[in-house]
Amino acid sequence: MAKTGKPRGTLRQKLEYLAIMAFFGAMWLVPYRLRNRCVGACLCGFLGRILGYRKRVMDNLELIYPDIPHMRKLQIANQVLDNAGRTFTENMFPEQFQAQDPDIKLHGAGLEAVLQAHKEGRPIMFYSGHFGNHEAFRAALFKHGLKVGGMVRRMANPYFDVQYKRMLDINGRGGPVFEADKHGTLAMLKSLKTGTALVLLLDLAVGHGIAVNFMGRRVYCSVTAASFALKTKALFVPYFSMRNRDGESFSVEIGTPIEHSDAQTMTREATKSLEERVHADPGNWFWIHRRWKYCPPTD
């Protein structure tokens, strides 16, 4: 499980952390929904430009959708940046977030299979990408008595890293959290064997794994999630935690489980399901990531 001990970092990192926490401490005084809209608007505007997020989103959209009109790209970019700002703010105030949308819509072809697997104590290996807000998914399943854990990458700022991991398990509603390293991977596999429900996100840039086609471009994708599902006989199932058009509510879809075959085939099927969802609702996906950073050699 990820450790949240006393962090050690540079003076600059500590000052950056204190500035962020002071900002959100002040934002606590702002009503919840207004606060989310304000931060979303800032990231759509000057903050997104200062951080370079807007340029990165537009560059990625140009790479994947070169033929769509520029105004449509701007529309998608605005939705992406607004969602990113709102998501960050929601996750900074997890108790308020969970209280604001108690009836998150949970549906999908795989929902019955997930609830049955949980009832039987069968391991569940969820997979997804960075859609909407992941915490809406965990909040929705918690209402059915299902805690979902997962793996997190260590943040560059060690002070904020500790704070972030504390927020992942607010009120004990989350499952075990593992560090994205060799020891965390082994611990995650052991946990899955005991019948837990865990999730791995498959849309981050990695420099290893198998070559897959994602949005018309070759990228690497890790086979860890599929391999874990095979080793533990876990249900291998997608979820899509989508922000609705009002910007404030969510709809969580549990997709059809992928049948067990081999890790490479299952990973390619999983990638295909993510790709289809991005095409269907591009503004709900996190185009800020450098998904196409690593390009596998052509065969």
Image (tube, helix red, strand yellow):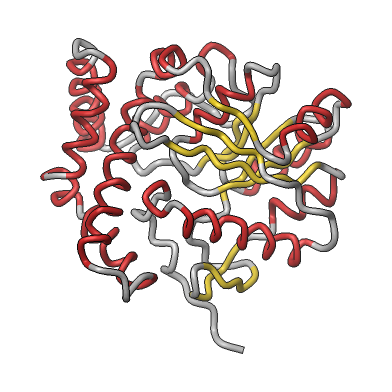
- Expressed as whole percent of the image width and height from the top left, the position of residue 268 reads 67, 65
- Position of the C terminus, as image quadrant, is bottom right
- Expressed as whole percent of the image width and height from the top left, the position of residue 147 reads 66, 23
Pick whichever, 167 or 181, lies toward us. 167
Which residue occupies 30% across, 46% down?
A: 79
Query: Residue 8 occupies which quadrant of the picture?
Result: top left
Q: Residue furthest left?
A: 46
Query: Residue 95 occupies which quadrant of the picture?
Result: top left
Which residue occupies 72% across, 47% down?
A: 256
Relative vertical location of residue 282 with respect to residue 41 in this rendering, above or below: below
Total of numbered circles in the picture?
Answer: 0
Pick whichever, 11 or 107, lies toward us. 107
Relative vertical location of residue 266 with respect to residue 255 in this rendering, above or below: below
Residue 45 falls left or right of residue 240: left
Which residue occupies 77% across, 55% down?
A: 227
- Expressed as whole percent of the image width and height from the top left, the position of residue 295 reads 48, 76
Pick whichever, 257 or 226, lies toward us. 257
Which residue occupies 76% across, 33% down?
A: 114
